[in-house]
Image (spheres, helix red, strand yellow):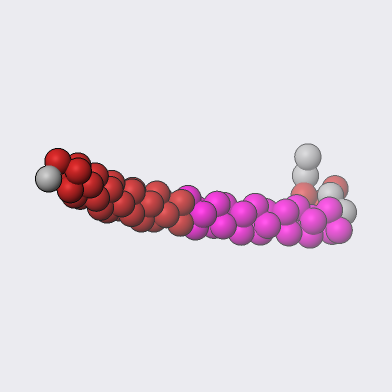
């Protein structure tokens, strides 16, 4: 199909669809980066809470043994 045979309105729509597709790809990439950051943050918080829980458990057990 030759470009001359495609109505200008269709060409403009195809251009706009292409622009929207690029924007969607950028948004998806940003979401993927944010998800990775959140996962790291949640993992760090989980490890910190686990350590605190272990300390509390040790303290509770030693208190009950006295």
Q: Is residue 28 magenta?
A: yes
Instruction: For the N terminus, give its image quadrant.
Output: top right
Any part of residue 50 in sight: yes
- What residue appears at the point 77 percent right and 49 percent down from the top-left corner? 3
- What residue appears at the point 79 percent right and 59 percent down from the top-left corner? 12
| Residue 25, horizontal then vertical, whole percent | 57, 52
- What residue appears at the point 62 percent right and 54 percent down from the top-left corner? 24
Q: Is residue 22 left or right of residue 35?
A: right
Region in magenta: 8-32
Q: Is residue 34 left or right of residue 60?
A: right
| Residue 34, horizontal then vertical, whole percent | 45, 56
Q: Is residue 53 above or below residue 12?
A: above
- What residue appears at the point 84 percent right and 59 percent down from the top-left corner? 8
Q: Is residue 21 magenta?
A: yes
| Residue 43, horizontal then vertical, whole percent | 33, 48
Q: Is residue 54 left or right of residue 9?
A: left
The rendered magenta stretch, by its main secondary structure, is classed as helix
């Amino acid at each position: 199909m030759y470009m001359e045979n495609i109505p200008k309105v269709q060409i403009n729509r195809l251009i706009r669809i292409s622009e929207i597709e690029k924007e969607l790809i950028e948004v998806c990439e940003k979401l993927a980066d944010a998800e990775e950051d959140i996962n790291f943050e949640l993992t760090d918080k989980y490890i910190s809470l686990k350590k605190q829980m272990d300390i509390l458990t040790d303290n509770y057990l030693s208190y009950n043994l006295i």
